[in-house]
Image (cartoon, rainbow, N blue to C red):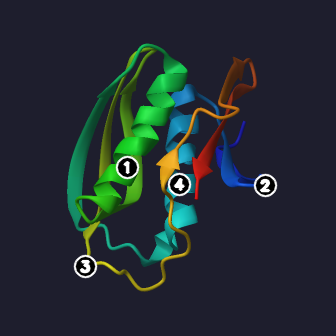
């Protein structure tokens, strides 16, 4: 399966459907989808590295917490990720490195204001073809 993400329309939210050969690749693609909703990832200068560690009770909660951490970095710390690598992922924890930049809000070229990552219609499916996940954003 080729890694990818696509946006899913919803009456009040915006969804991301991400695919990858592995769960880690699908989580990376979901993060790329989140960044692409917020702004054009091609405009992000990758001159600073951040490490992220997240723990959760299960993979669904882990996905929501992972994306919420990226959203927190953007909203509260004014850091936007442009490149993402999951270094470790299991059923209850994730460790990743992200490269990006500090910015001063409001950032030119912002596409959409994401309020939160939700559990609405959250789904994760892995089989022999890879992993497909779907998560919705409150916009």
Compared with 6, 23 (above or below) is: above
Q: Return the residue at label 1.
A: 70
Residue for point 42% across, 86% down? 108
Q: Nearer the viewer, mark 2 or mark 3?
A: 2
Q: Position of residue 43 (x, y in %)?
A: 44, 78
Q: Earlier in the sequence, mark 1 or mark 4?
A: 4
Closer to us: 28 or 117? 117
Compared with 97, 121 (above or below) is: above
- Mark 2 packing: few (<14 Cα in 10 Å), some, or many (20+)? few
74 left or right of 109 in image: left
For the C terminus, give its image quadrant.
Answer: bottom right
**SS label for mark 1:** helix
Q: Position of residue 85 (x, y in %)?
A: 39, 43
Residue 53 image-quadrant placement:
top left
Compared with 75, 65 (above or below) is: above
74 left or right of 10 in image: left
Q: Return the residue at label 2.
A: 11
Q: Return the residue at label 3.
A: 104
Q: CA distance from mark 4 to mark 3?
A: 19 Å
Q: CA distance from mark 2 to mark 1?
A: 24 Å
Q: Can residue 90 be seen at all in this image of the molecule?
A: yes
Number of dots carrying numbers: 4
Q: Return the residue at label 4.
A: 34
Q: Earlier in the sequence, mark 1 or mark 3?
A: 1
11 left or right of 100 in image: right
Q: Which mark is residue 87?
A: none
Q: Can residue 99 be seen at all in this image of the molecule?
A: no
Q: Earlier in the sequence, mark 2 or mark 3?
A: 2
Residue 133 image-quadrant placement:
top right
């Amino acid at each position: 399966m080729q890694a990818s993400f696509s946006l899913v329309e919803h009456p009040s939210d915006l969804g991301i459907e991400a695919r990858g050969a592995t769960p880690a690749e699908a989580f990376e693609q979901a993060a790329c989808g989140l960044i692409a909703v917020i702004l054009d990832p091609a405009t992000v200068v990758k001159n600073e590295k951040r490490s992220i560690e997240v723990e959760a009770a299960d993979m669904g909660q882990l996905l929501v917490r992972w994306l919420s951490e990226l959203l927190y970095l953007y909203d509260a710390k004014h850091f936007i990720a442009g490149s993402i690598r999951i270094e470790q992922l299991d059923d209850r924890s994730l460790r990743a490195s992200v490269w990006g930049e500090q910015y001063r809000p409001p950032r030119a070229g912002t596409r959409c204001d994401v309020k939160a990552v939700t559990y609405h219609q959250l789904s994760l499916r892995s089989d022999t073809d890879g992993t497909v996940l779907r998560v919705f954003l409150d916009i």
